[in-house]
Amino acid sequence: MNQDLSDTLTDSNSVRSITEATVLFAGDSGDGMQLTGSQFTLATAFAQNDLATLPDFPAEIRAPAGTTYGVSGFQLHFGSVNVRTPGDEVDLLVAMNPAALKVNLSRVRRGGAIVINVNAFKPHNLKLAGYNGVDPLADENLLKDYQVFKVELTRMTEEALKDFNFDKKVVDRCKNMFALGLTLWLYSRPIEPALDWLSHKFANRPEIQKANIHVLKKGFHYGETTEDFIVQYRVAPAKLEPGIYRAIRGVEALALGLVAASTKSNLKLFYSSYPITPASDLLHHLSRYKNFGVKTFQAEDEIAAIGATIGASFGGSLGVCATSGPGLTLKAEGIGLAIMTELPMVIVNVQRGGPSTGLPTKTEQSDLLQSMYGRNGESPLPVIAASTPGDCFHAAYEACLIAVRHMTPVILLADGYLANGAEPWLIPSTDDLEDFHVPFVTKPNHKVEGKEVFLPYLRNEETLARPWAKPGISGLEHRLGGLEKEHETGSVSYDPDNHEFMTNLRADKVKRVAKFIPPLTIYGDSQGDLIIIGWGSTEGAIKSAVDRLRADGLRTGMVQIKHINPLPPDLGSILSRYERYIVPELNKGQLVRILRDEFLLPILPLNKIQGQPFKASEIVDAAIAHCNQ
């Protein structure tokens, strides 16, 4: 919201126009906070606001109810202005129980609002949340620093459903709809999208459908009739580029990008994976596109998944698999085989907190160095990174393009924040997507002493890609495997000079990708005091930070690196225009190591490893401190 109560009122004494707001729904894992946040997001998209979301849920399937480590949250930043992050500070916290208040109070700005389900603040729940019998609602500082609204969510839900023949457990599950209805009213969001969703979701369970719709309307009407909320907020539509938009999550965009690549290339998409958080949803979404010829396969383990993907690529399909950090480790040997056989495939890595099981539902840019170097032998491959939920579409499409054009496996990096987050997405026209040629060979490609033969490792002069031959074609029989190949013939070779030659050749092929990388775009000042270098999901926070720094008079620019291996050819010349350098990363400085190795510059790492994305303010503070040294 970022406005004080003294802001100018419009339309009436009860409606206030604001430019942006950040809302956080938080409660127990069984309180339906992800669903509530998703429906509020849908309503916000219908209201034509720009938005960014941050779902935040525990790793446990069902943590003990009422405990702090069982709190599930959904944060949404929306506005009539350009929204790039889920928000540094929360304007409204909807806390369904004491644990939700304790975990998230620090996120709420001073003067912000808190809607509290006062019925949940009982001695037992207070103890589970660690309040040790002290009721936080009696804390004078809480009441002084925040606008606290005590709402009997549980009681009013029970009252609304008293004529329904439901047990207490079913009734309790409906209280999130009351909270949703109230919040929709508070921010002048349309209620119709949620009503339509409930109608379709519970079409086969009419009593549940009727109950949830009834409670949703009760919450909305409560906002209209209660005297507790004297102000209702209105956010004007954002000035977005004309076109058809939808609210899209990163994992949905990944799926659509892969399907688009399959359609444009006329290659059948084969997707193989073993369930692992947070990559599992990609299998769920791709399984819905059978009408596009997509084949999905849930493997028994990560090694089987990569093996099936290699087999699909060998057979002439667009082979794709996905995983997260520990799974990428298990796939390392298979990826090495794909590098040696030079088959096109895409490995999507949706990064999470590590090591080992680590923080499986929290975000982290944990696997960059593993993606670059985590295989035996000299085995480089292209690595690219998506930067926003919507950009996941274009990154997935480009990863397929690179894989096919250069006949190589490609690693596409996303993370939990991108995969689960959402934003408005301008749906592209398929005619605007770059075409790419599939280099299948159908006949022998070389002559030896007048006889036509097939050389499976004969190179394209521009890309160094080898030919792609489908099995079963007479005259194109060839040997593939993990042993070193002889140049051009593909025969097994133990010749030391040939091994060095082929090793360098495969590395040069990856370097050739740089010829197709477009020039970098500088955001902010094209030269000056400071450049901030980002990759992956840090883009939004960095751009917001650059805006603030430039407003304070610091000549600041930023570049977002999508292509990490190879690096963009013009990156070095851009860096030379600035005096200082910062790289914010959700790790211990992995891109910094790569850039220092390449450019020998005194680059400052800004690291955060908390399972949460950067706030713009964190980057601003670090930049100012660095420039004042």
Image (spheres, rainbow, N blue to C red):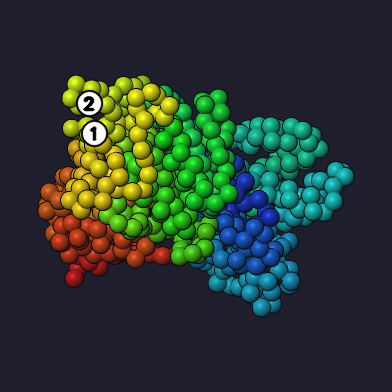
461 up-or-down from 588: above or below: above
Whole-percent x and y of residue 78?
46, 44
Q: Where residue 241 sits: x, y (%)?
A: 36, 30
Mark 1: secondary structure: loop
181 to 192, vertically: above or below: below
> Which residue corresponds to the image point at 74% horizontal and 71% vertical from the top-left?
124
Q: Amino acid at mark 2?
A: His
- Looking at the image, the residue that sits furthest to the bottom is 132
Give the residue pinned by disc 1. Answer: 458
In-image side of 350 versus 94 (left or right): left
Disc 2 target residue = 446
The residue lying at 43 percent from left, 45 percent from top is 348
Residue 52 appears at what percent x and percent y? 45, 45
Using the rendered view, name the quadrant where residue 406 is placed: top left
Circle 2 SS class? strand
Counting residues from the start of the chain, the first of labels 2 and 1 encountered is: 2
Give the percent coordinates (x, y) of residue 279: 51, 48
Front residue of this view, candidates 113 and 120 = 120
Horizontal side of residue 196 vs 553, given as left or right? right
Q: Residues within 10 Å of mark 2 (few under 14, many from 20)?
A: few
Q: How many marks?
A: 2
